[in-house]
């Protein structure tokens, strides 16, 4: 009987050992699975980090390339404007020298805001006055602003109430400048303009008035030497 019990205990202990050994691989497999998941998580994080870094590099490259192109364009424009300004200055000096040589003492050339103005000492009709301006490589003055009108009034003040043709005339009921632009800003003296067609405008120290284009008055030519810069 004792041998039987001992044999039974031995068998039972052997089964317990076998079961224990079978359980160990399960624990080992579970540990490997956890490690694999962690490894994959690290890989995903690294992959996302690489994507973010690559995106940042691309964005920075695009930004700096755009900024560089902008600077190059700006530099090109500045260089172009500088060359143009140098040429304009040469043209201005040429004009001033030419007028000093050719103009008599009764003629008056004045410089204002990138233009040269010629104030006549003769009396002519509007069309003849314009022809004279063209022979001087200029045209009758176009007054674009209040500041320019004030300059014209001050420049002609020494002539008292003397009047001068400007590049403005009435055609088909509309006042237009010689460049075909319609009059928008005006400086008429009270009582002007009148309601006659084919009239031309004059300026004086008082402002604008209009008379028949065939009447004889002085005139003001304008030659644009320098274009205003927009950088």
Image: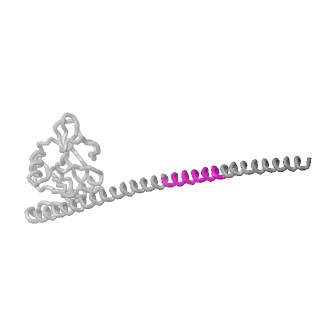
Residue closest to the far right: 1
Highlighted magenta segment, given as a residue range: 31-50
Q: Is residue 48 left or right of residue 66?
A: right
Indicate whether 194 appears above or below 207.
above
Towards the viewer: 69 or 120:
69
Depth check, front residue: 127 or 154: 127
Q: Position of residue 149 (x, y in %)?
A: 26, 52
Residue 69's quadrant in the figure? Answer: bottom left
40 or 168: nearer the eye? 40
Q: Is residue 41 magenta?
A: yes
Residue at position x 19%, y 34% in the image = 172
* Residue 160 left/right relative to 13: left
Single out the residue that lies furthest toward the top: 172
**Eyeballing the image, is 145 above or below 72?**
above
As for residue 174 lying within the magenta part, the answer is no
Give the total of numbered labels. Answer: 0
């Amino acid at each position: 009987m004792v041998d039987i019990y001992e044999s039974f205990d031995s068998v039972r202990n052997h089964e317990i050992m076998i079961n224990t050994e079978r359980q160990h691989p399960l624990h080992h497999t579970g540990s490997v699975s956890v490690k694999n998941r962690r490894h994959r998580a690290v890989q995903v994080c690294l992959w996302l980090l690489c994507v973010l870094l690559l995106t940042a590099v691309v964005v920075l490259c695009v930004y700096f390339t755009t900024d560089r192109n902008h600077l190059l364009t700006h530099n090109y424009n500045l260089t172009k404007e500088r060359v143009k300004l140098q040429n304009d200055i040469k043209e201005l000096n040429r004009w001033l020298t030419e007028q000093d040589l050719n103009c008599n003492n009764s003629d008056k050339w004045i410089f204002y805001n990138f233009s040269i103005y010629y104030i006549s000492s003769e009396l002519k009709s509007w069309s003849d006055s314009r022809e004279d301006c063209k022979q001087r490589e200029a045209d009758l003055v176009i007054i674009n602003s209040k500041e320019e009108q004030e300059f014209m009034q001050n420049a002609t003040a020494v002539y008292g109430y003397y009047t001068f043709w400007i590049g403005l005339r009435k055609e088909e009921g509309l006042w237009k400048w010689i460049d075909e632009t319609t009059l928008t800003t005006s400086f008429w003296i009270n009582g002007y303009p009148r309601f006659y067609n084919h009239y031309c405008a004059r300026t004086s120290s008082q402002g604008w008035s209009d008379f028949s284009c065939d009447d004889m008055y002085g005139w003001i030519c304008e030659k644009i030497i320098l274009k205003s810069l927009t950088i």
